[in-house]
Image (cartoon, rainbow, N blue to C red):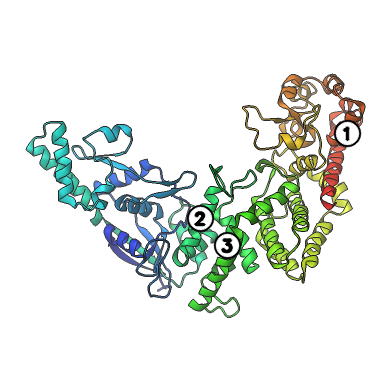
Amino acid sequence: MSTTHFSQASYVLSGVLDRIEMGEIGLPDIQRPFVWKNTKVRDLFDSMYRGFPVGYLLFWANGSEGGNRQVGSDKKQMASRLLIVDGQQRLTSLYAVLKGKPVIREKRGEERIQIAFRPKDDTFAVADAAVRRDPEYIEDISQLWSDGKGQHAFITTFIDRLVSHREVAEEEQKRVAEAITRLYNLVNYPFTVFELSNRLEAEEAAEVFVRINSKGTPLKQADFILTLMSVFWDDGRMALERFCRAARQPPTSGPSPFNYLVQPGPDHLLRVGAAVGFRRARLQHVYSILRGKDLKTGQFSDESRKRQFAVMREWQERVLDLQNWHEFLKAIIRAGYRRSSIISSNIGLLYAYAFYLIGKQDYAVEPHVLRDVIARWFFMTSLTGRYSGSYESIMEEDLARVGDARDAHGFVEALDRQVRNTFTKDYWTITLPGDLATAASRTPGLFAYYASLGLLDARVLFSKMRVSDLLDPAHRAKKAALERHHLFAKKYLARLGIKKRREVNQIANLALVEWPDNIAISDKAPSEYFPAYMARLSSEEQERMVYWHALPERWERMPYEEFLPARRQMMAQVIRDGFAQLAR
């Protein structure tokens, strides 16, 4: 008979919640932030009230050492022995309502879930203004368990309030009391729990979750690291998540991580910290390290875990430092990338942050030198899609190259050498023009072209406005400040028999114009509108406009199939010239 990796147990709801409150069961954000709508929480209580099954719970034995431990701001009486793998949303809902605790929403921050109950007909509802004014409802059932009055006092108070509004027969009072008692007794609702053995590795626990819950989101290594943080350093996990939430919303006052380039998730910043603190990109290894595993011997120890968490505390302080964060973002702006819509890879940007922190803290690279080398590095990795494939493996190789550096000069040279090895003559003249032969709306080559226009202080086509100014994300009108204009209009190409979207929407057929010009040009032939619009400009301005926007000589009269490759070569040259600005 094969060995089983789980045991089965029976719990009542109050027992599970008490163990969560004591700390024996960890309630981490293992799958995702709390995403259930309040209507789903309402339905959960309704099903339990009616005696319907609401599914099993899946826990994972942590195997941590015993003893007293404080996790987060609450006083926990013991270390978390069990971690929740499946059932988090249900238990978060039940814990939040029965204990009167707020949940964390991804965009709205803390929020109390208020579920109402109408005893006369056993109806649950999400509390709103109308429900709160209705004396028939218990407007927030959390009060039944958390206000300290006790069940009988609560029933008496509710019935007295009801009687003050209308006549309530004795039989109905009895019916109301029974309904509230039945609601109160949900604390005795039974759950079947499967406990996975602590011998299982993270990958095996994730596989169990996926196999038995095909509708769930597969767990990632970052989820398990966040789980460990919930158990052993809950303050750190909460700080990480607060930073990420604050990065998404403009502040009303004071310093903030908010920006227009990237809104990182906890998993992104974990990757930054792992690279900075452990020189690791594979989160699988980081997870094992934080569990206290010696990667050479394979042995686990609590002493090793404590040492590694101390390292984690140190690097997380650097990662979340607002001065570090915003100084790094200046390097991305220095590279010409001014808004999130032209950044094709958040992973690439966050890995650049890791190198920024390594250069600053470990090699003491001068700030202006560091900004420029990180700008060059990010430009290269973004343009080439360096981290679009097996990014963990590639990053481990990049970390190893930097690890051989002995001083600030060596660090800068290690990054620049890789940039030079990538940006060869053949890359600029053959590879890049080939990469530009696409109709994909989000492509690194097109974004690098926009960034280069900013670096070259280019004006918008037919305009005296700078591209960099109109790419500023502060512009939020109904119409975008800039629009992608088809140099050969769609309807014009259709008249020539060119109708396939992939041909029409080639990025070599797109140029940045102000939206009024885009509307006015409409479906005119290039030979009709181009001379008229260029007449706005002086001969010197026309010459620069043709260069910036990579327009071949007499392009407006070229056959479309000849125009595209000619413009790609010129766009590649503009990108090369833009990058050259970063080497000055």
**Which of these two is toward me, 260 or 115?**
260
Element on which disc 1 rests? helix
Disc nearest the viewer among 2 and 1:
1
Residue 25 drawn at (x, y percent)? 37, 64
Residue 369 drawn at (x, y percent)? 78, 58
Residue 195 drawn at (x, y percent)? 38, 66
**Which of these two is toward me, 383 or 548?**
548
Disc nearest the viewer among 2 and 3:
3
Element on which disc 3 rests? helix
Marks 3 and 1 in Cβ contact (< 8 Å): no
Q: Residue at x 75, y 55 (%)?
A: 371
Marks 2 and 1 in Cβ contact (< 8 Å): no
Mark 2 is surrounded, within 10 Å at the Cα level, by few (under 14), some (14 to 19) or many (20 or more) other residues, namely: some
Q: Residue at x 22, y 48 (%)?
A: 183
Task: Name the residue carrying label 2.
Answer: 218
Report the disc number at residue 544: 1
Report the disc number at residue 47: none
Three-letter code, disc 1:
Arg
Task: Name the residue carrying label 3.
Answer: 316
Mark 3 is surrounded, within 10 Å at the Cα level, by few (under 14), some (14 to 19) or many (20 or more) other residues, namely: many
Q: Is residue 406 left or right of residue 348?
A: right
- Place residue 491 in its image quadrant: top right
3D distance between C-alphas at marks 3 and 1: 47 Å
**Which of these two is toward me, 330 or 282?**
330
Element on which disc 2 rests? loop
Three-letter code, disc 3:
Gln
Three-letter code, disc 2:
Pro
Question: Of label 2 and label 1, which has the lower sequence position?
Answer: 2
3D distance between C-alphas at marks 2 and 1: 52 Å
